[in-house]
Amino acid sequence: MQFLKFGLVLALLLGLGACSSKFKSYDGPEVTHVHVSKGERRMYLLHHGTVLKTYKVGLGNQPRGDKKFRGDGKTPEGDYHIDRRNPNSRFHLSIGISYPNAEDIAEAAAMGKNPGGDIFIHGRPREFRKGGRDWTAGCIAVKDREMEMIYAMVRDGTPIRITP
């Protein structure tokens, strides 16, 4: 009897642990495009012309204008693609944006600056939950539980357009 109780408790704990995984699965329509509207503070996951999901987002700590160089606190604007993912991100989970592109590099070089990089869509860990909505160094932030679905839904290579 004692062994049976132990087995049931162990099975329950393992089942709960599986439910709390940050790695979700998704079997719905393919996300063919991501659109981020900085002015609306919204990110849209689209299947062709149909919006599958909409998320409120936080941006760089200087949200107006296009990113020009490393350290300016701005989120880039333009056409990019999802080019990598980090399951062990300091920011829960993250997917990389292919910034800088050739145009961004040339623009920064003309100013004698480094364009920067490491622009991601990522979660918002507890230490960054106080303060304003726009707190990143140029990334796009969502809630951790939202990032889990985004991570599952958006594949590497997916185009992303970031507009003012």
Image (spheres, rainbow, N blue to C red):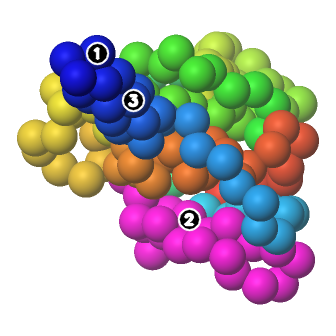
- C-alpha gap between disc 3 and disc 2: 39 Å
**Which element is circle 1 on?**
helix
Segment colored magenta: 37-59
Q: Residue furthest left?
A: 130
Residue underneath mark 2: 43
Name the amino acid type tagged 1: Phe
Q: Residue at x 68, y 67 (%)?
A: 45
Q: Nearer the viewer, residue 94 or 9?
A: 9
Q: Nearer the viewer, mark 1 or mark 2?
A: 1
Q: How many numbered markers are drawn?
A: 3
Q: Is the Cβ of the residue at disc 3 closer than 8 Å to that at disc 2? A: no
Question: Position of 20 compared to 49: left or right?
Answer: left
Give the number of the disc on residue 11.
Answer: 3
Q: 10 Å neighbourhood of mark 1: few (<14), some, or many (≥20)?
A: few
Residue underneath mark 1: 3
Q: Residue at x 75, y 26 (%)?
A: 84
Sequence-first tag of 1 and 2:
1
- Quarter holding the N terminus? top left
Q: Is the Cβ of the residue at disc 1 closer than 8 Å to that at disc 3? A: no
Locate residue 35, reporting x and y percent.
68, 65
- C-alpha gap between disc 1 and disc 3: 12 Å
Q: 10 Å neighbourhood of mark 3: few (<14), some, or many (≥20)?
A: few
Which quadrant of the structure image shows residue 155?
top right
Locate residue 49, reporting x and y percent.
83, 84
Question: Does residue 131 show up magenta in the picture?
Answer: no
Q: Nearer the viewer, residue 138 or 102?
A: 138
Q: Nearer the viewer, residue 123 or 36?
A: 123
